Image: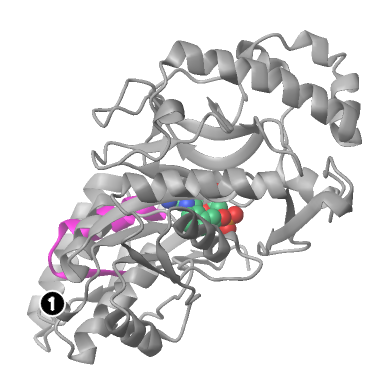
Amino acid sequence: MIWNETMECMDRETLRKIQSARLKKIVDYAYHNTPFYRRKMQQMGLTPDDIESIDDIVKLPFTTKLDLRDNYPFGLCAVPMSQICRIHASSGTTGRPTVVAYTRKDLRVWSECVSRCFYAYGASEGDIFQVSYGYGLFTGGLGAHQGAENIGASVIPMSSGNTAKQIQLMHDFGATAICCTPSYALYLAEAIRESGIPLEEFKLRIGAFGAEPWTEGMRAELEEKLGIKAYDIYGLSEVAGPGVGFECECQKGTHLNEDHYFPEIVDPQTLEPVEPGKTGELVFTHLTKEGMPLLRYRTKDLTALHYEKCSCGRTLVRMDRILGRSDDMLIIRGVNVFPSQIESVILEMPQFEAHYLLVVDRVNNTDTMELQVEVRPEFYTDEINRLLEMKKMLHGRLQSVLGLSVDVKLVEPKTIERSTGKAQRVIDKRKL
Ligand code: DLL
């Protein structure tokens, strides 16, 4: 199902014209209303008149998370506070939170984009959405909530945590869609099994999973364990929150709502544009935002874009699964490793569960990486030889895929801490 056929299926030439007109307008708006951008553009000898079409986007300055922190809390707002009606923030690991502010129109656009996602998953007013992303400063809860309400669905505003209650209400209220991180969905699946309530008594059919990288292996696992179809939902607070991108029924990439959030892929080192289909850093420019418009915001997310029309009829660009964030990339003895690559390997083998933890350290000036991974209950055994065999198999497979010797440590089912939000997959002791 398509929520906004005009915008989602428009021919790319017309879309490009709209993007050009919107870019010209937003650059002029940011120049006149955000002193930060006026200064940056003046330093580069640029005026809004230099932007004639979307192709001129490459002339514009980049924006980084550091710029948001330096202008904490509201320095990048383009409107007076009286026009701001919602404030979200993401905590990050150090220092000041990153703050984002929305006008009433920004919230409408955001809901529209999340509605596009849910319609693409085949949800409509007959559905009951259990929103188990955290509510509060995190954009996940309220973002999914507004999108579900906007399509006329019923919403259970659960927020994250309290797993026993999640399951009880999911069962009793007949939730048909669940919105949470894929790692929490896995935890819910386990908890449902342990509750003893047969899966057939649940009405769940759709999962809207995002906020952290996940793999095809994880999708298969979740679909099987929860008896649902699992869809990707992508987003980041700085751009809006959930709903910047979504999968359709074809599941051949994540469509981006590029009429509002214009994507580019650049080489993270040179910042030069990268050709379609090649992996690089995803960068977004707001085309319609009022409260806090950002130009060329560097997401640090690594992916590639594909512009061919999708079989679903949408012409909106599709992005590959996020490989990881450039700042989550581990360099182990010179080899680049993303946790998502390790997840793919683990889930190729039936013996292991998608509960894992990477512990990285430096011993005698050499990087070490230990992978703790849970063995599935049906494969767990006291027989040391069987365990050694499994360990050797996983070690060999990681070696051939990553070109790296990983110290594999098999652990009993349920040993690794479960997350109710974004999972922590890495402990890097080198940085502690
Ligand atoms: O995670 C917004 C969101 C909420 C998206 C609920 C989807 C669902 P932040 O906390 O600002 O916002 O984190 C944004 O999370 O730059 C990616 O690195 C990662 N991320 C988000 N969605 C996906 C996804 C929310 N579907 C950061 N796949 C982004 C992979 C994702 N990574």
Q: Residue at x 38, y 51 (%)?
A: 118
Task: Say whether residue 128 is left or right of residue 375.
Answer: right
Q: Is residue 327 above or below residue 293?
A: below
Does residue 412 appear anywhere in the picture?
no
- Residue 352: in magenta span: yes
Where is residue 165? Give x, y as percent: 39, 88
Q: How is the image coloured?
A: one colour
Task: Say whether residue 172 is left or right of residue 163.
Answer: left
Segment colored magenta:
339-356
Q: Nearer the viewer, residue 273 or 60?
A: 60
Name the image quarter holding residue 222. Answer: bottom left
Does residue 249 appear anywhere in the picture?
yes
Q: Residue at x 17, y 91 (%)?
A: 196
Q: Quick one: quadrant of the N terminus?
A: top left
Task: Say whether residue 116 is left or right of residue 355.
Answer: right
Which residue is disc 1 drawn over? 200
- Residue 335: in magenta span: no
Task: Say whether residue 166 is left or right of residue 401.
Answer: right
Query: How many C-alpha atoms fall within 10 Å of the one at disc 1: few (<14), some, or many (≥20)?
Result: few
Q: Residue at x 63, y 69 (%)?
A: 432
Q: Is residue 158 above or below residue 246?
A: below
Q: Is residue 161 above or below residue 294?
A: below
Count the numbered circles shown.
1
Q: Amino acid at mark 1?
A: Glu
Element type at mark 1: helix
Where is residue 166? Give x, y as percent: 38, 82
Q: Is residue 191 above or below residue 395?
A: below
